[in-house]
Amino acid sequence: MERKTKINAEEGRQDLLITREFDLPLELLFKAYAEPDIVEQWMGTKVLKLENKQHGGWQFETNDAQGNVTFRANGVIHEFVPNRKITRTFEMENAPFDVQLEFLEFERLTENTSKLNIHTIYRSVALRDQMLKLPFAQGINMAHNRLQEIVNKLK
C-alpha cells in the first residue's frame, strides 16, 4: 500500500517534516485536529482534555479491554490559529522519549483539497532516530487514512 503521508528525515538532523495532502476542504481537515469527538475516531484514543487556545493543555489515553492504560500522551498548546496552525508540545508518559515540539500548519490547496505540514523537533538526533525505528511511519499513515475516511463522511 502506498504511503500518502510523507516523512522527510534528513541525516544528522533532530527534526522530521511530515506532509500529507487530503481530499478534504481546509476547514474539515482542521476540525479533525480540533474537535475531540473527531480526534477520538481517527486516532482511536480517548481525548481526556483538548483546550484549543494559547497555553491550553491536551491529554489523550488508550486503554486495553481490561481497562489498563496502554498509552497516555499530553502537552501544551502554545499557538492555536483556526484553519491555519497549531503549535504544541507532545509527550508520551512512561516512554523513553523526551518531550517534542510540533508545528502543525494547514494549507488550502483548492476548495476541496488541503495539505497538512507537521514539523516535529526532538531534543537530539538520537531520539529522533529512535522514534524512526518504531513503526512510526506506518502508524501515522494509517491514522491519516482513517482521518480521510472518517472526515469524508462529514462533507
Image (tube, grey):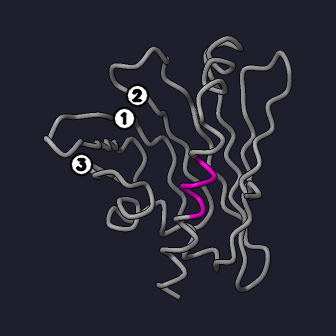
How many numbered circles does the render carry? 3
Which residue has dot 2 on it? 92
Find residue 10 and report its horizontal and vertical position in percent. Answer: 85, 27
- In the rendered view, does 90 fall on the left or right side of 50? right
In the rendered structure, which segment of residues is drawn in magenta? Answer: 140-145
Residue at 72% x, 77% y: name it: 113
Residue at 66% x, 54% y: name it: 105
Q: Is residue 11 magenta?
A: no
Which residue has dot 1 on it? 73
Residue 17 falls in image quadrant:
top right
Find residue 25 and report its horizontal and vertical position in percent. Answer: 64, 80
- Amino acid found under the numbered disc labelled 2: Met
Dot 3 or dot 1: first in sequence order is 3
- Amino acid found under the numbered disc labelled 1: Ala
**Compared to 144, does 126 lie above or below?**
above
Secondary element under disc 1, as helix, strand or loop, is strand
Image quadrant where one finds the N terminus? bottom right
**Compared to 9, does 1 lie above or below?**
below
